[in-house]
Structure formats: structure tokens, C-alpha cells
Image (cartoon, grey):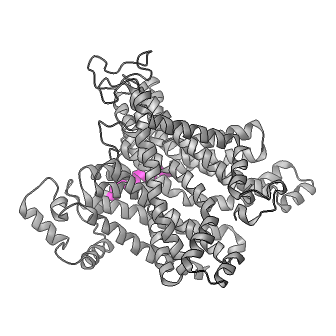
Amino acid sequence: MTALETPHSEIDDTSDTPTRRAWRRLRRRKSAMLGLVIVAALVAVALLAPWIAPFDPAKQSYTMVRKAPSALNWFGTDESGRDLFSRVVFGARASLLAGLVSIAIALGLGMPIGLLSAYRGGWTDTIVSRITDAMLAVPFLILAIALAAFLGPSLSNAMIAIGVTSMPIFIRLTRGQVMAVKVEDYVEAARAVGNPAYRIAFRHILPNIMPALLVQATLSIAMAIIAEASLSFLGLGQQPPAPSWGSMLNSAQRFLTQAPWMAIYPGLAIFLTVLSFNLLGDGLRDALDPKER
Amino acid sequence: MIAFLARRLLQIIPTLILVSVIIFLLQQLLPGDPATVLAGEERDPEVIAQIRQQYRLDQPLPVQYVYWIKGVLSGNLGESMRLKEPVARLVAQKFPVTLQLALMAIVISLSIGVTAGVVSAIYKNTAIDYTVNLLALWGISTPNFWLGILLISLFSVQLGWLPASGYVSPFEDFWLSLKTTIMPAFVLGNSFAAVLMRHTRSAMLQAMAADYVRTARAKGLSERVVVIKHAMRNALTPVVTLGALELGTLLSGAVLTEQVFSIPGFGKLIVDSVFNRDYAVVQGVTLVTATTYILLNLFADVAYVLINPRLRG
């Protein structure tokens, strides 16, 4: 299942740690490295937004309404005369934050619940599994919309909605992985020498299921970013005037005839971000799971 | 087969009950007194009192749930505060529209996705394979509402070939209906096609490496026959199930697609209800969508058993 179980598969690096070996395999994948570089660049853009953006993203100017891209406004301006390049740069913050926070929520809740469910078995497991099934039975975005609707529209509620909606995937994945690892000899051995349950869970089981969770988390971030953009496109995410790619596309739709550029760049930004997380996730899966190749 | 069907039908009952509990509990998330919030703009104490009585909000939660689910089971999904119409009637009105869109999207994505997957598996590691994989990556990473906006910009605003929004029923005017739905259906099917392509490609690669394909080749059968009669028939079985599991994504996608193209379907209904704080409609539509999805999965499971003789028994 994991690199740990096949320490002799690659003779040259038997003395290596599994992490280092996975990193080397990842480095050999050009598309994964491209994804990693774009992700790093996007994080840098989000962190350094005030220094990169040439204008205040919220500053309106009625003499600059809907100007086409130019040397001054690289991506043009919107219906309130705001600089689109600056708004796209600041929009990276909402998107990346939503991706990271919502998946942190999903993982933070899903992993312990899955672990408990698989470890405890019996009734706990039955109840957790049935609830997971039920949550997975509601289409992802529809559940997120319903949650965001009842919680009220805001970026933090959108992140909670996406996080809770993505949680069942992590419960199920953790549970399945733990079930598989639980019966391995080294876990049996750890139990036989009298380790307490929590120690077995954290020292012996968790490190072995981490690779699968990491891959799923990376791919889920991509999904969460699309979900956040979708919610803010519908008006359920980041509230105006704060910039977010989804809501920028929403206003762009009203000016397709007069200002088509308004629709191009925010969408490209979402596409690039999602693409880079997908590339990285696919690469991680190949690097961490040698049998899947 | 009958035993399998019966077992599978019994299995979905607890899932359906739990789904309804989750959807029912959503209203507990409303800040403050639900009756006041549910009454919406109207602050009329009489209306609030009526709502409190109608939903039995003064009673404990399990009692409220039982009354609610009793109504649901007899076809009463509550009433829309905004439109003053039963939710069930609204759902019945909007459902065919989304269904038409979804079916067209499935046809489009199956024809593109499966063909592309088979082709890229046959031409593994060639320029064709790489191109198809790149297209799939584009399909998976593109938000469908953005694609919709781009297509409207091109085909409606620039070229003027297709209407940018609106919907006409195929029973009214078939060609006009096709014109209004072809773009949204393509947008909706886009990411689905990409997912199907990836599944088909890996299933085909597996099948092409199997012994029975080698035997077929050794018998001197033409490559065409080998691919179509031997490899494809076996490869497509898992694709059916995997495809069915992605149908939920299609229903989710319909929300955004209908919003972009102003199509009066399910998705538009749920979004409009969210903004008008028409919570009964949100709950009703979510419940119907989830039930549809659960049933679709059941059909997919049954179909899987039917086309796979080894699982029949």
C-alpha cells in the first residue's frame, strides 16, 4: 500500500527514508513539478498581493469604467472602474484560503472520525458508515449550497460548508486505509508487546495512511477551490466589494457585449489554480503509490 | 437476481432516512428563531404563529421530524413562501427541464469521453494520447460556469449563432429547444466527458494487456475486431458504474449551468430560493435531488450486474 511496505523495491535507496524516496520520485515527474511551481507561485502572489498589485483592488473610479486591457491596466477595468489585475491578484487570497481551510476542516474532522470508526468497529463503525453514505448521497455542490444558504452568505461560511461537505470522503478513505493497515503484522506486533491503542493509532497506523490522505487532500483542494468559486459566483461566498474570482465572473456576465475581457482573467486564474493542484495531486499519487504505476 | 435486488433496495432505506434527517436538521442552522426567519420579509405575528403551528416548532425536534417526514412521504414537501405554491408542484414543473439537460449532457459526454478514452488507449504514449490527456486535464480543471460564459461570449455575442439564455420545451418547438439547450448541455457534460475519458482510457489499457486480447490477436483477428469486440466490451463495464457515481457531479453542475444560461430548471429553482430565503423549497429540492441520485446509483448497480454475467447468480 505504502512505500514503507516495499523497502526493497528500489535497491539504490534502501537506506533512505520513505519521504525522501517519494520526493525523488515526485521530482522526476515534470507535470507534478510544474504543478508544484505554479502552486508555490500562487501562494507567493497571495501573500505578496499588496506589493504586486499596482492599484487598490477596491478603489472605484468613474472615469475608468470598463476600460480594455492597456499598459496601465493590464487586465482592463471593471464596471466600477476598478483595476482587474489588482483584483485578480487579491482574489488569489480568497481562493487559496478557501481551498486550504475547507480541506483542513474536512481532514481535521474526517480523519479522527474515520480512525475511530475503523478502530472501534461494531456499532460506532455502523453508525459512522451509514451517516457517511447518507452525506455522500447528496450531490456535493447542492449540499454545500444548502449549508451555505442556511448558514448565511460569507466566505467563512462557504469554507465551513465546503469543509463539512468534503468530510465524508476523508472519513471513508481513512476508514478503508485503517482497516487495511490494522491487520498488518507490524500492527499486530505493536499490540502484542502491549502498546496502548492511542499509541498504535498515532505511531503505527497514522504514518502509513498519510500518503493516501495527502493525495486525496491535494486533489480535494482543487475541488474546494472550484466549489468556492462556484459559491461566490452564485453570491454565496466572499461578499462584495472584497475581490474573489467567482464573484468577478458573476459581474462579468452582465457586460459580455461591452467588456468581454472582464470574463477572461478571473476564469483563467481559477483554471490555473485548479490545474496546478490537480497536476500536483496526480503526481503525488504516482510517487507515493508505486503499485499504481 | 431477485435476492440481490431486494437486498439492495433494503440497503437504501437507512440511507434515505439519514439523508432526510440531515436535510431536516439544516433548518437548525438558521440563526435565531426559525419561525421568524422562515416567515421571511413578513413580520406579521399571525404569519409567524401560523408557521410555528404548521411546522410544530414548539414541539421537540424528533416530533417535528416525524410530522415533516409524514408529509414528505405523502407527497407534501411544504409550501413555497415566495411563490405561494406547493414545493412538490414546483419540483414537478422544473424537473423535466433539468432532466432534458442532464440527458443531453450524458449523451454528449459519453460520445466524447468514451471515444477519446478508447482512441488514447489505442495510441498510448503518442502525440494523440498526450493531446487527449491534456484536453481531459482542461476539462477537469475548468469551472463549468466560466466555460459557459466563454461560449456565450463566442457563439451568442460575437457570432450570434445561438441564444445566450432562455429555454424552450422540445414539445413546443424541437429545433428551438435544441438551440437553447445545446450549449448548456455541452458545458454541463464537459467535465463529465473528461472523467469518463480517464476511466475509459485506464480500463482499455488494462483490457488490452489481458490474456484474452492476446489470444484474439494470436488467432489472427483484425485489430478492429480485437479492439471493438474483445477489449472494448470488457473495458466498458466498469466505466458504466464509475460513470453513474459521477452523476451527482452532473446534478451539482446543473445548478451553475442553469444559472449561467438562465434556464428555469432545478438548479435555478434552488438558487432563487436561497436568495429569497425560501427554505422549504431548498429543503425540498435537496431532498428530491438526493433521492434521485440514490436511485440512479441503484440502477447503475443493477445494470452492472446485468451486463456482467459473472456477477449474476
User: Which corner quadrant of the image does residue A5 belong to?
Assistant: bottom right
Residue A200 can be seen in this image: yes
What range of the chain is rendered magenta?
B91-103
| Quadrant that contains the N terminus of chain A | bottom right
Question: Does the magenta run of residues contain B101?
Answer: yes
User: Can you give x and y, in whole percent of width and height, for residue B32 in the image?
Assistant: 19, 62
Residue B107, horizontal then vertical, whole percent: 56, 49
Answer above or below: position of B125 versus B25: above
Residue at the image point whose x is 35% and y is 46% from the top = A237
B269 within the magenta span: no
Residue B174 locus on image (x, y percent): 45, 42
Q: Would you identify the image quadrant in which residue A30 lies?
A: top right
- Left or right, residue A66 beside residue B299: left
Residue A18 image point, x, y percent: 71, 58
Look at 67% across and 84% down and name the residue there: A192
**Camera-side residue of B270 and B172:** B270
Q: Nearer the viewer, residue A70 or B182?
A: A70
For image coordinates 53% across by 46% down, the residue present is B189
**Residue B296 visible from this viewpoint:** no
Quadrant placement of the C terminus of chain A: bottom right
Name the magenta segment's main secondary structure. helix
In this rendering, the count of numbered labels is 0
